[in-house]
Image (spheres, rainbow, N blue to C red):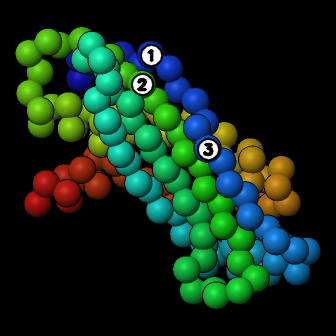
């Protein structure tokens, strides 16, 4: 679907790193295997067949009530739909799958850099996100 759209611009729209205290940082470091990545994708149409896609990654430990860090990045991408006769379900696949596969490596790299510089120097995201699988699961 590469020839059906092109990326106009991508940028970090919002960023949140919440480590309220030194104790929290120590707790986060000790409980990092319990942290999980959540992905949320929203889109809205713009003028002239353009679409703004907002990919939100939230990295948090849902099991902890206190002494937890919350890390979130909102990454905006504006795409231009080149195929004037494109069907709605094709645009949906572009937004939820094809575009995500394309932008995710750079988004993950930026997010990891920020988190490492925020006091988590050895952080790695163990599980890769399979956008193709997520899209297929959504259809069923």
Query: Which is nearer the N-term, disc 3 or disc 2?
Result: 3
Q: Quadrant of the C terminus?
A: bottom left
The reply to whether dot 2 and dot 1 touch (C-beta < 8 Å) is yes
Residue at 61% of width from left, 44% of height from top? Answer: 14
Do we see residue 5 in this rendering?
Answer: no
Pointer 2 local density, CA inside 10 Å: few below 14, some 14–19, many at least 20? many
SS category of the residue bearing label 1: strand
Q: Report the number of numbered marks.
A: 3
- Residue identified by numbered label 1: 8
SS category of the residue bearing label 3: strand
In the picture, measured across the screen, residue 42 lies left or right of residue 34, that is left
Find residue 58 and report its horizontal and vertical position in percent. 55, 60
Pointer 3 local density, CA inside 10 Å: few below 14, some 14–19, many at least 20? few
Find residue 65 and report its horizontal and vertical position in percent. 64, 87
- Residue identified by numbered label 3: 14
Q: Give how far apart the Cα atoms at labels 3 and 2 are.
A: 15 Å
The quadrant where residue 59 appears: bottom right
Above or below, 51 relative to 121: above
Q: Give how far apart the Cα atoms at labels 2 and 1 are.
A: 5 Å
The quadrant where residue 89 appears: top left
Query: Which is nearer the N-term, disc 1 or disc 3?
Result: 1
Above or below, 31 relative to 37: below
Find residue 128 and report its horizontal and vertical position in percent. 48, 54
Query: Which is nearer the N-term, disc 2 or disc 1?
Result: 1
Residue at 46% of width from left, 29% of height from top? Answer: 77
Q: Quadrant of the N terminus?
A: top left
Residue at 76% of width from left, 75% of height from top? Answer: 28
- Residue identified by numbered label 2: 78
Looking at this view, name the residue that lies furthest to the right.
Answer: 22
In the picture, measured across the screen, residue 34 lies left or right of residue 130, that is right
Q: Give how far apart the Cα atoms at labels 1 and 3 are.
A: 19 Å
């Amino acid at each position: 679907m590469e020839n059906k759209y092109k990326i106009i611009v991508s940028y970090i729209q919002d960023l949140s790193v919440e480590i309220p205290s030194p104790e929290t940082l120590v707790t986060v470091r000790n409980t990092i295997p319990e942290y999980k990545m959540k992905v949320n994708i929203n889109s809205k149409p713009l003028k002239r067949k353009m679409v703004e896609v907002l990919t939100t990654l939230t990295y948090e430990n849902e099991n902890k009530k206190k002494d937890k860090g919350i890390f979130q990045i909102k990454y905006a991408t504006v795409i231009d739909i080149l195929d004037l006769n494109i069907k709605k379900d094709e645009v949906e696949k572009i937004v939820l799958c094809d575009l995500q596969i394309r932008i995710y490596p750079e988004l993950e790299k930026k997010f990891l850099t920020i988190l490492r510089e925020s006091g988590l120097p050895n952080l790695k995201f163990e599980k890769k996100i399979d956008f193709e699988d997520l899209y297929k699961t959504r259809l069923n």
